[in-house]
């Protein structure tokens, strides 16, 4: 068959033609018929020519032939279930499962606090990890990516052992991803990539190649710097779904800023599932190849990509020529060992989790001392107590107790005089009082200032979204707080009726009554002597009167001294009750909602610590 005929029979990736628009045949496993009712094992040529002789296998030239149940060579049992039955699903180890569970919990707890755009990448990682876990764990999906003219399609064909992806001078040549699977059971993995059956191939059947690359699913991507937007969209979409990537660079574009800034640098954490291949070394002398390789390693190091040298984990850097085959064996060997480990998918998911954690760090990592200190709580309660006038209420209670003591223990004449002043005397000692609306406005301002202060302190070390949530919780709680404080102040203020009296008050009242009685007896005695009813004797009645007159004020003065302590305690108790009522109201309306937000943040921060594997502040 001539080369022209072979090219005519080739499935063009750029322009599939009208045949691609026709009905697609049913896909069974890795068998992907392309033409009408062709079945696996059908050896009829497409153009209706003569069928091959008995025992011969139809080969469609440049396109790798389809493996069929009849003509496929027997395969030795491989790891897993690659040769019979459905392949075993992917299994994640304990640490990775724990990190995924923590990420799922983190996203769930953060839905009400963070916008969907912030959590979009983490949610995508969870979805893709779940989808990948349900698929084959015996296959490794590796994409070949590169710039225009880097020779990635030629390398793809060389690894497959037969031309599959179209190559040539025209740019771009590859318009859609093409899949090549080295073993059965990878259909669902390729379906996940959105690659249709007409773009799925099998490599050249070779016992050595089958054994070395068993389980490999190789994807040839369009150029990542293609002028066609759809080509770049294919690249970006598939790169998020494959297990590993082979980046093909050439001596002219290996330092291209688009490659390093758009792909390699953001994917620095995926170094363990990354190959970087310098192609087209046949165009360079040996010393130039080494120099370019050294410079490429330097650029990769600047991108933050760890290099897998000296048996350390990291990216594999190789030099080869896909045209001459020089160095391809090294890549095939490294790729075979990589696929045989069956760990690329889990490492890719782990790297995705690392990247998602790094993106989320600004919204979860905070400084030290997150939360409200006891000092801040006490200061908030004190501000609320001042707003309701707890100190003034205590002083008023103390004065009320002293007035009650003075009235109970004072001389009758003084009590009578005070009663007269209270009833009929002019109000000469009254002071101007602030109007009630002014007092209420000042109290409300104090409450608002207290709420702002405590919310600012609680949110001081928090990331912006959580700080905003704390402030919003405090503002919601402060609505109606002033009215509630006023109501509590009325309930917890001075008790109705007279203040309680200590046990010595009756004795003081009896002593005061005795002093008054002495004055009355002494005065009556003197009146009797003046009237001539009693014998003249001035000493005794005068002494009695003096005792009553002097003793009454002395008893009152002593009672006043004795009443200071109980009055102070009574005032302090009244102030304490009002402060506790204000603190209880502020705690229920403001501090508890703020504490709930802080507790939620601590929970998500703990989950983030499990994901990132590092501390994020306390």
Image: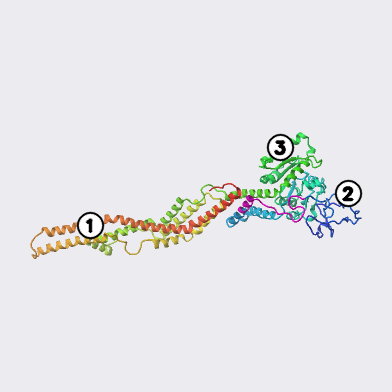
State which quadrant residue 484 falls in.
bottom left
- In the image, which disc is placed on residue 4? 2
Query: Would you say the magenta stretch is mainly helix, strand or loop?
Result: loop
Q: Which residue is mark 3?
A: 295
Question: Label 1, label 3: how many angstroms apart (C-alpha)?
Answer: 104 Å
Give the mark nearer the N terminus: 1 vs 3: 3
Question: Is residue 508 covered in magenta?
Answer: no
Count up the numbered dots. Answer: 3
For the residue pair 554 and 38, the one nearer the viewer reads as 38
Where is residue 485? Give x, y as percent. Answer: 43, 60
Q: Is residue 244 left or right of residue 325?
A: left
Q: CA distance from mark 3 to mark 2?
A: 42 Å
Q: Residues within 10 Å of mark 3 (few under 14, many from 20)?
A: some
SS at circle 3? helix
Residue numbers of the magenta segment? 77-102
Q: Which residue is mark 1?
A: 555
Circle 1 residues within 10 Å: few <14, some 14–19, many ≥20: some
Say which element carries label 1.
helix
Among numbered discs 3 and 2, the one appearing first in the sequence? 2
From the viewer's perspective, tell me whether residue 236 is left or right of residue 462. Answer: right
Q: Are marks 3 and 2 in contact (CB under 8 Å)?
A: no
Q: Earlier in the sequence, mark 1 or mark 2?
A: 2
Q: Position of residue 269 (x, y in %)?
A: 66, 45
Placement of 488 over or under 55, stated as above or below: below
Secondary structure category for the residue under label 2? helix
């Amino acid at each position: 068959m001539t080369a022209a005929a072979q090219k005519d029979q080739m499935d063009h990736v750029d322009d599939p033609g009208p045949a691609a628009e026709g009905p697609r045949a049913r896909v069974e496993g890795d068998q992907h018929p392309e033409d009408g009712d062709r079945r696996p094992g059908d050896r009829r040529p497409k153009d209706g020519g003569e069928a091959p002789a008995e025992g011969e296998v139809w080969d469609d030239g440049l396109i790798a032939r389809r493996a069929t149940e009849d003509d496929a060579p027997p395969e030795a049992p491989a790891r897993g279930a690659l040769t019979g039955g459905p392949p075993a699903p992917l299994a994640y180890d304990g640490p990775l499962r724990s990190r995924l569970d923590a990420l799922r919990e983190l996203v769930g707890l953060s839905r009400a606090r963070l916008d969907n755009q912030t959590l979009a990448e983490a949610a995508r990682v969870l979805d893709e990890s779940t989808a990948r876990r349900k698929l084959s764990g015996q296959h490794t999906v590796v994409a070949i990516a590169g710039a225009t003219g880097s020779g990635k399609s030629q390398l793809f064909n060389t690894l497959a052992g037969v031309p599959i992806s179209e190559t040539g001078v025209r740019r771009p040549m590859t318009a859609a991803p093409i899949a090549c699977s080295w073993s059965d059971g990878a259909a669902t993995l390729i379906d996940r990539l959105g690659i249709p059956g007409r773009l799925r191939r099998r490599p050249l059947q070779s016992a050595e190649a089958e054994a070395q690359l068993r389980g490999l699913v190789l994807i040839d991507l369009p150029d990542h710097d293609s002028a066609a937007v759809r080509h770049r969209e294919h690249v970006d979409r598939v790169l998020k779904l494959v297990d590993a990537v082979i980046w093909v660079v050439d001596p002219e574009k290996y330092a291209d800023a688009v490659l390093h800034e758009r792909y390699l640098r953001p994917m620095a954490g995926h170094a363990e599932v990354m190959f970087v291949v310098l192609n087209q070394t046949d165009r360079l002398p040996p010393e130039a190849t080494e120099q370019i390789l050294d410079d490429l390693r330097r650029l990769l190091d600047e991108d933050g990509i760890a290099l897998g040298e000296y048996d350390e984990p990291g990216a594999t850097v190789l030099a080869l020529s896909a045209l001459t085959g020089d160095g391809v064996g090294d890549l095939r060997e490294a790729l075979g060992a990589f696929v045989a480990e069956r760990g690329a998918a889990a490492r890719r998911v782990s790297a995705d989790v690392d990247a998602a954690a790094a993106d989320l760090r600004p919204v979860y990592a905070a400084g030290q001392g997150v939360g409200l200190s006891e000092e801040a709580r006490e200061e908030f309660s004190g501000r609320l107590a001042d707003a309701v006038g707890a100190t003034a209420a205590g002083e008023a209670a103390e004065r009320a107790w002293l007035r009650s003591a003075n009235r109970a223990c004072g001389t009758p004449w003084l009590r009578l005089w005070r009663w007269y002043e209270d009833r009929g005397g002019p109000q000469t000692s009254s002071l101007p009082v602030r109007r009630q609306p002014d007092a209420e406005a000042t109290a409300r301002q104090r409450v608002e200032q207290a709420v702002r202060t405590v919310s600012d302190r609680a949110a001081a070390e928090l990331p912006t979204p959580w700080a905003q949530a704390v402030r919003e919780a405090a503002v919601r709680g402060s609505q109606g707080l002033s009215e509630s404080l006023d109501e509590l102040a009325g309930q917890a203020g001075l008790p109705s009726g007279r203040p309680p009296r200590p046990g010595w008050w009756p004795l003081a009242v009896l002593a005061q009554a005795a002093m008054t009685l002495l004055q009355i007896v002494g005065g009556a005695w003197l009146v009797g002597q003046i009237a001539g009813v009693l014998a003249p004797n001035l000493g005794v009645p005068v002494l009695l009167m003096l005792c009553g007159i002097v003793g009454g004020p002395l008893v009152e003065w002593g009672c006043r001294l004795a009443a200071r302590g109980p009055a102070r305690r009574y005032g302090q108790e009244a102030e304490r009750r009002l402060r506790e009522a204000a603190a209880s109201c502020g705690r229920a309306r403001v501090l508890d909602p703020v504490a709930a937000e802080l507790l939620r943040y601590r929970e998500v921060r703990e989950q983030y610590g499990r994901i990132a594997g590092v501390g994020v502040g306390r």
